[in-house]
Amino acid sequence: MEFIKQYITQSISAAANSLRLSTHQIEIVALLKDAIIKSDDLGNDLIRMKKITELSTLAIKLTEIYNYLNHNTIDFFKISDQFKDHSRNLIKDLNQLLDTTTPLTFKNALEKLHPKEEEKQKETQEEIKVDLSKRKPDEDVFLKPDTEKIKEKIILEDESDSEELFIQNFETNILRPIKPLDLMLKNLSNADFDYEEITSFIKIMSDNGRLSKKIGFEIISDMHETIAKTLTLIKNRKIMPGKEIIEGLRASLIVIVAVVKGKEVDITNYLNRADDLQKKISKIT
């Protein structure tokens, strides 16, 4: 099953690379791939996707790929050509999905896959999501939180002063540690670092990731969590800061900056490197 998930997500990445994506669309692609990777029963989830209006057309093509991989003997001499065909066949339907959804509406569509599970999450997270629930589809749903809704959340949840300030100056607070951390990563690759500095960055990235998640910025939160976990493993000497690890960490930083600043550039390759790092550390943690 792991092979099938990897094949399908890489097919989606290849199809996405053929399109000129906005930051919103990059977010949707990342959410789609994440849903496939984390699925406990991919076959049934694809069947459910075909019943959801926003996902139905693309889900049909993904099901075809799934059935091909699940029910046929794989000819590894021809798999490269087959992969290219599968990826090309996804482009039109993936483009349609990206043109007709926003990150918020796409997440709402994914929630329909497991309604009971999501309902439980809503019960525990209802208040912290209030600032996103009333947004219009064309609003920048993960870069500029509604200040009035944030004020409501601050009042209702009795936020600490530090968290209130973080939310009000979100972009500045997220970007402030990026350059110093990037410099540390360069030193880290040369084995020139001290553990106190790593510990400091672990705390910063953990805190910023937690608060980003609290106000609904999932991709930004995931990247922070990946960085914090990886630095913790390095600090505890469970992994070595080799070239591949450093590249994954820097890719995560680049994704954070691109999303926060709303850069209209294709960062799919950086998302893929960050995904690879997440998979690697998940096997260790």
Image (tube, rainbow, N blue to C red):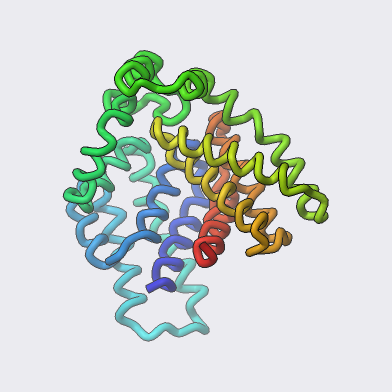
Q: In this view, does 156 lie to the left or right of 272?
A: left
Q: Is residue 21 above or below residue 167?
A: below
In the rendered image, residue 261, in percent from the top left (x then y), is placed at 57, 29
Q: In this view, does 85 lie to the left or right of 232?
A: left
Give 83 or 229, whichever is nearer the viewer. 229
Q: Is residue 265 visible?
A: no
Q: Can residue 118 be seen in this view?
A: yes
Q: Is residue 103 above or below residue 139?
A: below
Q: In this view, does 225 lie to the left or right of 114?
A: right
Q: In this view, does 270 lie to the left or right of 39?
A: right
In the rendered image, residue 227, in percent from the top left (x then y), is placed at 59, 48
In the rendered image, residue 104, in percent from the top left (x then y), is placed at 33, 35
Give 129 or 31, whichever is nearer the viewer. 129
In the rendered image, residue 115, in percent from the top left (x then y), is placed at 18, 48
- Residue shown at 37% from the left, 86% from the top: 73
Q: In which quarter of the image is residue 266?
A: top right
Q: Is residue 29 above or below residue 59?
A: above
